[in-house]
Structures are given as structure tokens and as C-alpha cells.
Amino acid sequence: MDNMRNFVIIAHVDHGKSTLADRLLELTSSVEAKKMRPQFLDSMDLEQERGITIKMHPVRMIYHAKIRNPKSEIRNGLEFSASDLEFSDSEFILNLIDTPGHVDFNYEVSRSLAAVEGAVLLVDATKGIQAQTIGNLELAKQQGLVIIPVINKIDLPQARIEQTEKEIADLLKIDPSEIIRVSGKDGTNVEQILEAVVTKVPPPKAGGDPTSAQLRALIFDSKFDAFKGVIAFVRVFDGQIRKGDNIYLIQGKASSEVKEVGIFKPELSSVESLGSGEIG
């Protein structure tokens, strides 16, 4: 799992999460150019119509890091220092969850934060820090997530870049140089976010032998499909999930058979199993 990173994008509504997610999908070649459309992860008609994210959507991306990457012996819980890093071109599995920004979906955001180790905190340079910026940040800090601060929309003439940078630095008590300046619209500096995810967000904690450990997983969202039935979005913490397994749902106090196991690339793609640390 050393080459795996799980993270979310959190922000106030309309600060550009879905547009940034589009650029990440493009950079990692997760979607063919001819199939790409704005707000690709917002698949509901209402999301496309209103331009906001309502349902969370996980996606698995493959990224070849270009700069310093953690050495293979680094494990979760250790801070990265210059001596712990080396230059290479390594392949990483990045599991992203795009979250809603509206206050009405706070519960959904909190569920997704429990499924990852890092969070990209996105702030609109034309608006600065707003209510859900702080609300989502507090939820992320409660989960002990690594925060990657990013200023978006730096391409706009009304952008207040330095002022917004100072607001974020004061809020997080960090040096302004740690904040990434990007334009989700034209892609400026967006790859720096992927590099920061690789070097700063720790890999998932190892959960022992996945073939023998008891399954422990979090269902952070679900949807109904007319052909497949209920599709549950899960993060596996221990053990593994395979087709045909009978799993026990603690909150529902019921057992259910797993009909299919898959990952989102971003469309659902069947796999043999999901192991510790994986999202699918």
C-alpha cells in the first residue's frame, strides 16, 4: 500500500472543486479526451443543471509522480523529511473522493473524511475563506487528516491572491509558501497538487494479512442502480471483500451478499477483490 494515497477535495460551495477534479482526471489520463465533459464526476442531472456537487463520487487515478517521492520503507504515521525522499518516476494509485460543498451535505462530507488520510482544502481567490471552508476544515482536523491548502481561480482579474493566501496561512498557522496557487479552469499549477498528495499524504495503514483478517470497512455513501441494485461506496480498513461474500452491516443489523466488487475509474470496473486501504 506504500504507493496508494486516499484523499478528498473540500471547500465552500462554488469554490471550484468539480472543475479542479476535471483537471486531475485529465492529468492522470483517467478519462479519454473525447469523453471528457465539464464536472465529469457530477453525474446527476440536477448536479449538471445547478453546477454543484450533491452526491459524493470516488474515482481511482493512476499517477506517475515527477519529483520527490517517499522511499518505499516509509510507513503511515511518520513525517516526511528531506532525507526520507528520493527523486524517481513512480506509479501511484490515487483514490479521490469529490465532496459536496453546501452546508446541507455536512454529514456526507464527514463520512468521506473518515475514509481517507488527506484533504485538499480549496479556497476561491475571489471570495476568500467562507463558512464551509472553516466547517469542512474542522471536520478534517477532527479526523487527523493531512491538509493541503490550495488557492483556486488565480486566473481571474478580481482574484485577491495575496490576501487569500494570508487568510489561509493565519487559519492553518503555516508559512504562505506552503500554499499552492492554481487555476482549475486553465490547469495552472494543478500538477503540484498531485505531487503534494504523493509526498505529504501518508499511505493507508496496513491492516495485517488481507486474506485472513476479519473484514472491517466503512460504507461512506450509496446509490441505487436499476440493473445492479444498491451500489455501496466503501473504504476497506481490514481484510478484503470478494464477490459472493456475505457481509454484516452493523448499523442495519443485517447480512447481505456481495454481488459484484469494483473500482471507479471513474466508471465502475469489476475487480476480483478490494483489500485493506482500497476504496471502491
Image: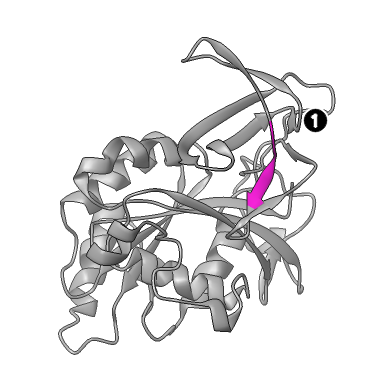
Q: Where is residue 242 shown, x and y percent of the image?
A: 76, 32
In reply to whether residue 175 is colored magenta, the answer given is no
Is-magenta flag for residue 260? Answer: yes
Quarter the C terminus occupies? top right
Place of residue 188 in the rendered image (x, y in percent of width and height, measured from the top left): 43, 85
Residue 168 drawn above or below residue 26 = above
Please tell me in which quadrant of the rendered image residue 167 appears.
bottom left
Q: In this view, does 106 lie to the left or right of 215?
A: left
Q: Which residue is depicted at the point 51% across and 43% down? A: 225
Is residue 144 among what the camera can see?
A: no
Residue at the spot of label 1: 210
> What is the span of residues highlighted in magenta in the rendered image?
259-263
Q: Is residue 247 visible?
A: yes
Q: How far across and down, in percent of the image, does residue 218 sit?
A: 54, 30
Query: How many labels, in total?
Result: 1
Secondary structure state at the residue bearing disc 1: loop
Horizontal side of 25 relative to 71 (left or right) equals: left
Name the residue furthest front: 227
Mark 1: amino acid: Pro
Above or below 204: residue 187? below
Position of 134 relative to 16 (above/below): above
